[in-house]
Amino acid sequence: MATPLSQTIHDKRYEISGFAIEKTAKLMKLSFSRILLMHPEIDITVDQWIIIQLLFKHKELSQQELSDLAFKDAPTITRMIDLMALKKLVNRNPDPSDRRKFLISLTEEGHHLYNLVDPIVREFRFEAYAGIADEELILLDNIMQKIFLNLSKQN
């Protein structure tokens, strides 16, 4: 038989809505998008920024790796890379081990843009995470990783 406390905890586990996560993620993306729009010298979207960050971190990735890491489908990644190549932010080079594939990397202009946007991102996150202790942020990240892993097993 469940105690009142264990029943409360059990009930709370099922009352917590994924909607809170979704609305927070959407508001973060919208807020950051507005910040980018306030900087006319920065002509990228939030999703393009994610690609730039991934390429900065990994140096060179295939389109499939970018798709997996950015959690975007292949046609979306292809369109994004096409646009970013037109803006001269990324290079698309043939993969020496598989001529059907391309390896994507940042151009000098892409690196310059990364260095321009990164401090803006850091300030945005600093403001978004105001009042949250470092330990809480680490716990939040761990929890989000566990939820993602649980859902990934189902798909």
Image (tube, grey):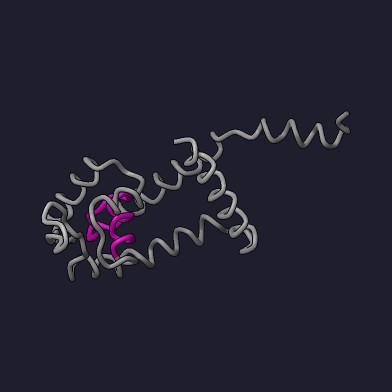
**Which residue, as the protein is rendered here, is positioned at the far top?**
1
Q: Is residue 128 left or right of residue 117?
A: right
* Range of magenta residues: 39-55
Q: Is residue 42 left or right of residue 15?
A: left
Where does residue 51 sit, x and y in percent of width and height? 29, 55
Quadrant occupied by the C terminus: top left
Residue name at image x 53 percent, y 50 percent: 145
Residue name at image x 18 percent, y 61 percent: 90
Residue name at image x 16 percent, y 62 percent: 97
Where does residue 108 sit, x and y in percent of width and height? 18, 71
Corner quadrant of residue 30: top left
Residue name at image x 22 percent, y 60 percent: 41
* Viewer-nearest residue: 13 or 45: 13
* Viewer-nearest residue: 150 or 28: 150
Where does residue 64 sit, x and y in percent of width and height? 26, 50
* Viewer-nearest residue: 33 or 151: 151
Where does residue 122 sit, x and y in percent of width and height? 44, 64
Reply above or below: 30 against 48.
above
Q: Is residue 22 left or right of residue 91?
A: right
Q: Is residue 77 left or right of residue 92?
A: right
Q: Is residue 148 magenta?
A: no
